[in-house]
Image: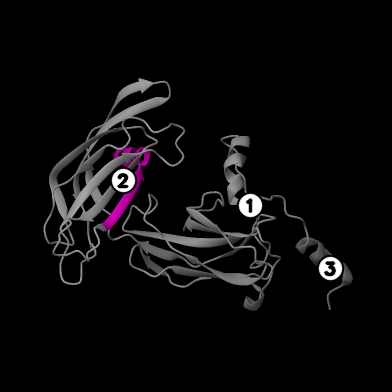
Amino acid sequence: MASPSRNNQNRRRCKEPLCHSYNPGQFHSMAIRTSPHSTITIPRSTSDTDLVTSDSRSTLMVSSSYYSIGHSQDLVIHWDIKEEVDAGDWIGMYLIDEVLSENFLDYKNRGVNGSHQGQIIWKIDASSYFVERETKICFKYYHGVSGALRATTPSVTVKNSAAPIFKSIGSYETVQGQGSRRLISFSLSEFQAMGLKKGMFFNPDPYLKISIQPGKHSIFPALAHHGQERRSKIIANTVNPIWQTEQFSFVSLPTDVLEIEVKDKFAKSRPIIKRFLGKLSMPVQRLLERHAIG
């Protein structure tokens, strides 16, 4: 039998107060208050380190380990939390190798219900985080009061088969400097898309619609160059189009977003076919960084 003093030590260790209290909405203001080189760590829950039986561990499960954007059913995230829960608890979506809680791709509050068990529906949309054909992610449950990580799902493979890709970015240069605004001129070529969704009876006749939009968190208002738009030629009757000879030039800020949509040519004989086939949104800065890496 364990001694009373040892039990008291264990009790003190389990009840030791946690140091931080953060939720996703506070991460932005928190980053402003801290220096650029400082690191904030959120304490790990003790649920799956100190307790040895699986029945005593908090769990976060996801309905599928595979998700195809635009094709799969919405994911169901189910939690079973053994420790204290709070209405401010939240669940974040992360790249599989991300360790910082503030670097979520998306998040949802779990709701005001204080139950230790529950579930939410999660729809994943095409975004700048899913520019590769496949991306591995996971979901993490955080305690709203303490900021402690309660549980993590197994990995989920997100497939964005309809996302257009391009193989070549032409040379780019700064064409205008005005204060902190640095306009950049660049060109893109050799586009292709794979595995586009086909209609019930017909393959699509896809074309590209490419535009420059202001970034979501840009400090600049909408400017004259925003809304630039280019359209490619139509490639008839294919789910794997390639635009090999066309080149498109743009002027943008590094904080802008390049949006590439794959659309189906509208045909009166095929009105039931959806015109939208796929989309890729990528920050211009990330685009240039990828080009620099080669």
Q: Are marks 2 and 3 in contact (CB under 8 Å)?
A: no
Report whether 173 appears left or right of 7.
left
Give SS at disc 2.
Answer: strand
Q: Which residue is mark 1?
A: 42
Q: Residues within 10 Å of mark 3 (few under 14, many from 20)?
A: few
Q: Is residue 247 above or below residue 72?
A: above
Q: 201 or 134, which lies in front? A: 201
Q: Which residues are magenta?
A: 277-294
Q: Which residue is mark 2?
A: 259
Q: Residue at x 36, y 32 (%)?
A: 253
**Residue 139's x, y, as percent?**
51, 62
Residue type at mark 2: give it: Glu
Q: Is residue 259 above or below residue 160?
A: above
Residue 6 circle label? 3
Residue 79 visible in the picture: no
Report whether 173 appears left or right of 72.
left
Residue type at mark 1: give it: Ile
- Residue 157 in which image quadrant: bottom left
Residue type at mark 3: give it: Arg
Q: Is residue 112 magenta?
A: no
Q: CA distance from mark 2 to mark 3?
A: 61 Å
Q: Residue at x 38, y 38 (%)?
A: 214
Report whether 106 appears left or right of 241.
right
